[in-house]
Image: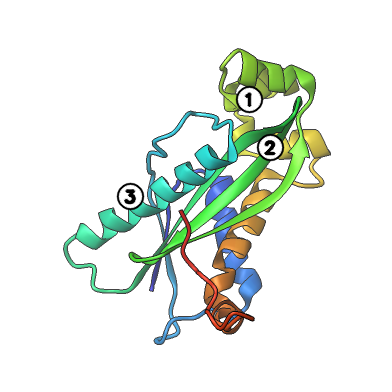
Amino acid sequence: MIIAIASTRAPKVNGVKRAFEKLNGKFLPADGRLSFESIESDSGVSATPTSLAEVMKGARNRADRVFQTLRARAGVNEDILSIGVEGGLYSVGRVVFLQSWACVCDGTDFWFGSSGSIQLPLALSQAVIEEGKDLGKVIDGFAEQRDVRSNQGTWGILTSDMVTREDSFELAALNALAPLFNRKMYQKSGAGGQKSETSAL
């Protein structure tokens, strides 16, 4: 099985790979083999999404586009599972949070999972929400560093590297993969006699 990661940025790619490492054999295809491929993919949303719906849409778009790219490529006969990961913001009142999301696609269904959330300092939230700037660019000036998003990310800056951008994508990917490695629970009939839904949006 090919695990297609819809990004070439190290924090996203490594986060997804770490999620599979943590599964430690709980998720394996019939032939027992997994191979990883990283492909850049357009999210189709803002550079920094500013709502949960937009972040989830970006993750889904990435997963879907990479799946279709591999499926159409000549010579690809293996099963494919694509994973799109997207970071963005959402607001609760005047408080703005950063969160990472992952979407897993098998060509038919989509499954979602997210990381925890962290509150942004006012200077960052104003720059992105009110001024429309890209968090990936704003954080460099805020932290007085270069290319933060390719390294520890805003997560690492705000937590003194206790939680990095890679960590957030690992958790998001693990949560998105839960319906696949824990099918027994997700396909279990509920009180009403119906199985739980594994697709979304």
Q: Residues within 10 Å of mark 1 (few under 14, many from 20)?
A: few
Q: Gap between marks 1 and 2, in whole Å?
A: 20 Å
Q: Quadrant of residue 67?
A: bottom left
Image check: 193 left or right of 143?
left
Q: Amino acid at mark 3?
A: Arg
- Where is residue 170 shown, x and y percent of the image? 63, 57
* Mark 2: few/some/many CA within 10 Å (<14, 14-19, 20+): many
Query: Which disc number belongs to residue 26?
Result: none
* Position above or below: 196 against 176: below
* Residue at numbered disc 3: 65
Q: Position of residue 198 (x, y in %)?
A: 50, 69
Q: Quadrant of residue 185?
A: bottom right
Q: Is 61 in front, or is 93?
A: 93
Mark 2 highlights which residue? Answer: 98
Q: Which residue is mark 1?
A: 146
Residue 141 visible? The answer is: yes
Between the residue at mark 1 and the residue at mark 3, the CA separation in whole angstroms equals 30 Å
